[in-house]
Image (cartoon, grey):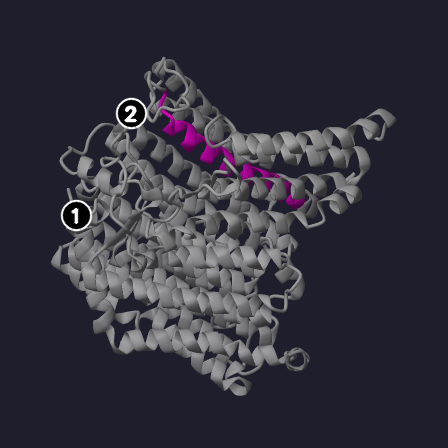
Amino acid sequence: MNTLILRTIVPLLTGLMVIYSIVVLLAGHNDPGGGFIGGLIAASAFALYGIACGVAPVRRALYFHPVSIAAFGMLLSALSGVISLYKGVPFLTGLWWFPEIAKGVEVPLSTPLMFDIGVWLVVVGSLVTIALALEEKE
Amino acid sequence: MESYLSILVGLYFAGSVYLLLSQSLVRILIGIALLGNGVNLLIFTSGRITRGVPPIIEKGAKVAEASIANPLPQALILTAIVISFALFAFVLVLSYRAYQEIGTDDTAKMRIAEPVEPSHLPKGY
Amino acid sequence: MKTISTEGAMLQTATAAVDWYILAPVVIPLVTAAILIIFRRAVGLHPYIALLALAANIYASFELLMKVKLEGPLAMTMGNWLPPFGISFAADLLGAILTLTSSLAVFCVALYGMGDASSRERRFGFYPLILTLLVGVNGSFLTGDIFNLYVWFEVFVISSFGLIVLGGTRKQLDGAVKYCFLSLIATTLFLIATGYLYGLYGTLNMADLSKIVAPLKFEGPLVVVSALYLLAFSMKAAAFPLYFWLPASYHTPKIVVSALFAGLLTKVGAYSLLRTFTITLPVAGDSWLMDVMFYVGVGTAICGALGAIAQTDLRRLFSFLLVASIGFMLIGISIGTETALSATIFYMVHSILIMTALFLIAGVIYEHRGSLDLRSLSGMNKDLPLLSLLFLGLGFVAMGFPPFSGFWPKMILISETIKQEVYLGTFAIIFSSFLSIISLGRAFAFGFWRPLTAGAEDEVAIQAKQLTVYSKLQYVPVLLLMILVTLVGLLPGYLYELSSLGAKGLVDTSSYIAAVFGGAL
C-alpha cells in the first residue's frame, strides 16, 4: 500500500479526519454524533496513516502510547461522574459552567462533555492499539 | 412487522445453535457472531416497532413535539454491540493463537489441559 | 419558552456525601486501574498503589455495610434521574456483605501477586486487570438494574479473559478457549433473557420489576424468561449439567489468577440467581422452577464431590470442590425460606474466602515443590511444617469441621432441609461433604504425610534453591485468610446476624423497593 499518491494525500486526509472527528464529538450533545462515533473516525484516520506511512510515524505522531490514551480517557470519564460529589447530586449528574472568555462570548462546559471526551479517548486509544498491532505484523 | 422480525430472530437463533454444536472452532465463532446479531435484533423488536421521528429534540424545545421512536432499545443495542464486538474480537484472536499453538481447531482434539493418558496412581489411592 | 416541571422525572433534593459509599467500591478500583495503565511502565509501583486502593476499598465497603445494617438498604439513581428512568444502584445487606468479602479476597490476591506476577506480566496489566475484575464484581453486587448487571458481568468477564491468558502457555490457551466460549454464550443467554424481559414489562429496574411481577401468575412468557435466567446464571455459576468448563480451565492460568476466579466469579453467578429469584422475579421464586433448581443443586453437589475424589492434580481437585460448594448454594436458594437463604449468604461468604485461600496455598506448594500432582508430591510435613499446618487447617475449613466457618452454614442448611422435609437435599449435602473429606484427607495423606518418595530428594533440593524472599511473603495472604475464616468460625453469631437480616430483606422486598424509590411508593 506504499504508493506515492497515498503517501502524499494521507497526511492531509488524516488531519482533516481528526478535525472532523472533533467536530462530531462536540456536536454530540444536541445533535447526532458524540464521543463513540467521533472516536471511531479519529481511530480510522490514524489507522489509515499507519497503512500509508508505516506504524512508527503514527506512534511518533501520537506521542503517548495508545493504551495510556485509552486509560486517560477512562479516568476522565470516571472523574466526570465524581465531580457531582461536590455538588451534592448523584453520580454522573450533568453539571454546567458558562465561563465568559471574551465579552459576550460564553463557552458552555459540562460534565457530559468531559465524559464524552473520555469516551473519545478510550475509543481512539483502544482501536489504534488494535489497528497498529495488526499493521505491524505485515 | 414484529411477527416477521420474531421469525427472523428465531432463524438466527436456530442457525447459531446449529453452528455452536459443531466441533470446529471456526464454526462456533460464526455461531457466536450470529447469536450476537440475533440478540440485537431481539432487543430491537422488544422495543416495539413504531413509526416516529428520531428521538432528537429541536433547539429551544424541552420536550419532543411529535411522537418519537423509543430511544431506549437503541441505547441497549449499542451497549450490547460494543461489548459483543470487543469479546468477539478477543475470542477470535484467542482461537487463532490456540490454533497456532495446538495445531488443530477441532475441539474434540484439544485435550492439552485435560490429557487422556492413563494415570499411574500411587499405591493406596 | 415553555417551562417544564421536572419533578416527576428528576431528583429535587440534595444527595448526602455519605451516600457515596455505595459507589466507592466501584469507583475506587476503576480510577486506580486507569491510573495504573497510564503509568504502565512504573511496574515497581503497581502493587503498592493497588494495595493502597484495595485497602481504601475495604474501608469503604465496611462503612457501606455498617450504614446498610443501621439504616436499611441504600440506593442512588445515576444522573439525578428518578427511578425507573435512571440506572439505580441499590445496596442491601446481601450486596454489602459480598462486596466487603470480595474486596478482602482481592486484597489477599493482590498481596500474593507481589511475589508471583513478574514485571512482564505486570506491564501486560496484571494489577489493572484484577482491579477492573473487582469493579465488575462489586458493580454486579451493588447494581439495582438488570441490564446494568449484564454490563458489569461483561466488565469482569473481559477482565478475566485478559487474566486467563496472562503468560500464554499451550495449556493455558486450551483452557482459555473453553472458558471464554462458555462465558460468552452464558452472557449472551443473559442478554436474550433481558431482551425478553424488557419487551414484556418495559422496565429493567429490579425494584420496579419486583412491583410489577409480584401480583402476576407464573405462566406464559414469564416462565421462558425465568428459565433463561436460570440457565444463564447456572452456566456462569458452574451448576450441574453445565459445569464442565470450570475444571477444564481453572487449573491452567497462573495460580494467583485461578485463586481470584475461584473466589469471585462463580459466586457472582450464584448471587445473580439469588437476586433474580427473590427480589427481581418474586413469583418465579415460588414456582416449580425452584424444584428444577433444587435437583440441579443436588446434582452439582454430588457430581462436584465425585469429580474431586477422582483428581490427582491439586488445582483440579479444588475446582471440583468449588463446583460442589455451588451445589449447596443452589439447594439453599431453591428451598427459599428465610433460614435457608441466610445459610446460603453465610455459605457464600465462607466460600469466597476459603476457595481463594485453597488456590493460594496450592500456589505456595507449587513454589516449594514445582508441582501440584499428587502422584509426585510427598513428604511436605517434614520440611514445611507451617505449610502442612495451614493446609490441614484450610482442609478442615473446606470440609466443614466445627471450629471453622464451613460448619455453621452447612449445619443450618442441613437442619433446614430436614425441617422442610426435602431429605434428598439433606442426603446430597452430607454425602458431598463426606466425599470432600475423603478427597482432601487423601490429598493431605499423599502430599504431606507420605514420606518423601525415592528419587524426589534431588528435585526438592533444586526447588529449594530457587526460593526467594517473596516465597516467605506468600504465606502472609494465606495466613490472613486463615485468620478470617477461623474468626468467622469461632464467632459465627455476628455474620449469622448479618446474613439473616440480609435474607429477611430478600424475603420481604418492601424495604428494598422503598429504598430505590426514595420512600415514596
B75 or C301, nearer to the observer = B75
- Residue placed at 22% from the left, 67% from the top? C496
C422 or C198, nearer to the observer = C198
C380 displayed left or right of C282: right
Residue C2, disc: 2
Picture layout, residue A47 above or below residue C152: above
Q: Position of residue C330 (x, y in %)?
A: 29, 52
Q: Position of residue C59 (x, y in %)?
A: 37, 68
- Label 1 SS: loop
Q: Is residue C279 magenta?
A: no
Residue C519, disc: 1
Residue type at the position of mark 2: Lys
Q: Quadrant of the C terminus of chain C?
A: top left
Q: How many circles with numbers are drawn on the protein?
A: 2
Q: Position of residue C2 (x, y in %)?
A: 29, 25
In magenta, the rendered stretch is B69-98
Judged by depth in the image, the label closer to the viewer, 1 or 2, is 2
- Label 2 SS: loop
Q: Is residue B88 magenta?
A: yes
Residue type at the position of mark 1: Gly
